[in-house]
Image (cartoon, rainbow, N blue to C red):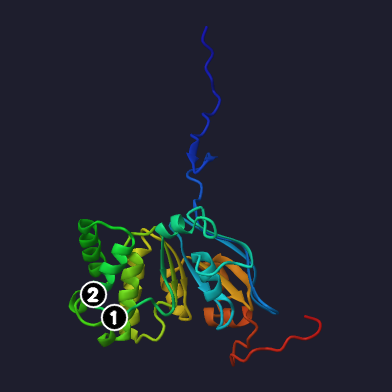
Amino acid sequence: MNVPDDRSPEPAVEEVSGQSTATGPAPIPMIEADHLSKIYGIFIATNDVSFTVNKGEVVAFLGPNGAGKSTTMKMLTGYLSPSKGKARIAGFDMSSDRLEGSRKLGYLPESGPLYPEMTPYSLLDFFAEARGMSKATKRNQIEKVVDICSLGSVIYKPISKLSKGYKQRVGMAQALIHEPEVLILDEPTSGLDPNQIRGVRETMTRLGKEKTILLSTHILQEVEAMASRVIMINEGQKVYDGPLEQIDQNDVGLDHVFADLTGHCPQTGVKLQKTFDD
């Protein structure tokens, strides 16, 4: 006689990146700061900063001037070697496997690597060739990033003659030329007017649908428009890491939260002095 088996069926198990999960794909780390510190003599630029950005996330990286944002980003990209800790891009250690990690990474520093005597086309052609692309691949990729970054009207003009907004778009295009999975962008809208900021924001919104992005900015409206998570550092140390919707639980405004977490007066913006009891 067959006895019915009334046990609940076991959930399907998926294997993702070496891990099993019964609830779906496990998060895939694409940007990893593992206890990163950068020390110059007696000056500590960053101190034991750790966080992970998983595949598909758009994360805002915030902090006041001098907090250590750019230093952290440079360590993540392999541009600077950390005094302590590890930086990984798509699982590659940026100290020992920088070339492999760089193939997965598009990096836009605050002052982009632009050559003023070149045109956007010649610059993109140069970077594509430096990455070993064939002629056919170069042509296709240049056409693609020119369309994404809306550079068609200036593609053959000298970069020195372009507005800052267009220069930022050229910098973005060079970061995208090799179709990276990860983007690290340091102040991509710095110094732009409202119309230029809107154009960059639209580009970022499109890219955020398929890339993993770590974005440094001082414009808090951009955070609310584009990011799902916030990481904040102050004086070289991480002071917040969490979902955007949880950072302002008291509904006082992101600017007030930013001031409070970075030791400034929310009303005046003046830096508060620490007491001996702090």
Amino acid type at mark 2 = Leu
Relative image position of residue 176 (x, y in whole percent): 33, 65
Residue shown at 53% from the left, 82% from the top:
255
**Residue drawn at x 77%, y 80% as measured from the top left:** 278
Residue in the picture at 68% in, 78% down:
41
The residue shown at (70%, 79%) is 42
Could you tell me if the residues under marks 1 and 2 are in contact, i.e. CB atoms within 8 Å?
Answer: yes
Judge by depth and name the residue closer to the eye, 43 or 181.
43
Residue for badge 1: 166
Can see residue 150?
A: no
Q: Position of residue 131 (x, y in %)?
A: 34, 61
Specify the label residue 174 is tagged with.
none
Q: How many marks?
A: 2
- Give the residue number, with chain letter if any, for mark 2: 151
* Cα–Cα gap, marks 1 and 2: 7 Å
Q: Residue furthest right?
A: 277
Q: Quarter-wise, where is residue 211 in the image?
A: bottom left
- Judged from the image, the secondary structure of the residue bearing numbered disc 2 is loop
| Residue 102 in picture, x, y percent from top left | 43, 60
Query: Considering only vertical position in the picture, is 156 above or below 134?
Result: below
